[in-house]
Amino acid sequence: MNPNSPFLRKTSFKFPIEEWRVQESCHIALATDSHYALKEDLDDKCYSDALLKMVEFVKTVNPLGCDFAIHLGDFKDEDLVPNEKSTLEYLEKMEHEFSKFKGPRFHCLGNHDLDSITKKQFLEIAENSGNGLDSRIEPRSGYYAFDLKSIRFVVLDANYDEFGNDHFFRRGGDWQKPFIPEKQHGWLKNTLDDSPYPCVLFIHHPLYAYVKNGHSYHVVNHMEIRAILEASQKVLAVFNGHMHEEMYHELNGIRYFALNSMLEGTFVQRNCFYVFEIQPDRMRIDRYERFHKLDGKRINSDI
Ligand SMILES: [Fe+2]
């Protein structure tokens, strides 16, 4: 697919970096909340078209030469009656398409990734293919870090209960109460402190309070995590999914980007994914979304 396809609109957002801290430019392909499953649509949630959207994502970003791709979680979903076998098949199909990305690829764990399968089962199939990049990546861990082009990238996992047990929703648990356990705090602090580079973080759940329609979406102990990030003075940006909504906040000098989901809408109606570029003096986010109204007006001169 031509990345300049008239059916995808690219909109760019630029954010200056005050301090010159990044040596080399870096491009990252980002997608989140695709929720693939072969089940009936629910309102505008079109689970079965997520596979086509993943195919389009990979075909669009491959010619752009991104340094890596990362999915921010809720990669797949499950049947209305939870079923381990079909859930594993959904995960395998999505991973098969994601693996066509030409470069290292990574996953953040989302709550729907731990519905009728365990964290261990998910991580056995959803590979973090950049394992060769850096010894810091533990293949079977939901949280890890790696260095690329003078930036340290850190992936966090908030899919735990308050006692530090892995969430596994088939056996219970409250998706509205994700915690980052104590063990990960120390690891995060050390990972940031010993970084010679500025850091960019990825996590499924927001690190600020976010409540919608009576449901709570944020990491319960987000203030403790934010204190670690702020104390390091090395965090350029934090990306999350989970909210199915785009949002931007700058809190105590750190930029927080919530990215929109792939899930909503049929394939012909909608897709949504991003490319994030870090340059020495600025960050840029390109949003790709479906453009299906050919009204004769050029909306964005970038494409
Ligand atoms: Fe989601």
Image (cartoon, rainbow, N blue to C red):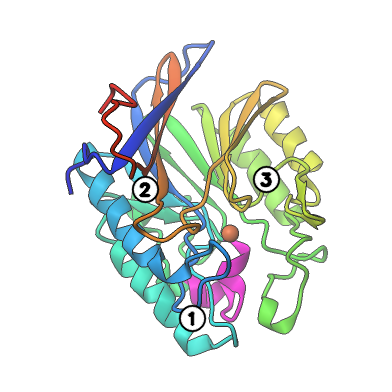
Residue underneath mark 1: 87
Going by the numbered disc 2, the residue's amino acid type is Ala
The Cα–Cα distance between marks 1 and 2, rounded to whole angstroms, is 23 Å
Residue at the limit of the structure toward the front, as seen here: 295
Residue at image mark 2: 69
**Mark 3 vs 1: CB contact within 8 A:** no
Left or right for 36, reference 154: left
Label 1 neighbourhood size at 10 Å, few (<14), some (14-19), many (20+)?
many
State left or right for residue 129 relative to residue 155: left
User: Tag 3, which secondary structure?
Assistant: loop
Residue at point 54% right, 88% down? 83
- Say which residue label 3 marks: 206
- Under mark 1, the amino acid is Thr
Question: Looking at numbered disc 3 in the image, what kind of residue is underneath it?
Answer: Pro
Question: Residue 177 location in percent, x, y?
Answer: 79, 60
Q: Could you say which quadrant of the image residue 227 lies in?
A: top right
User: Is disc 3's CB within 8 Å of ligand 1?
Assistant: no
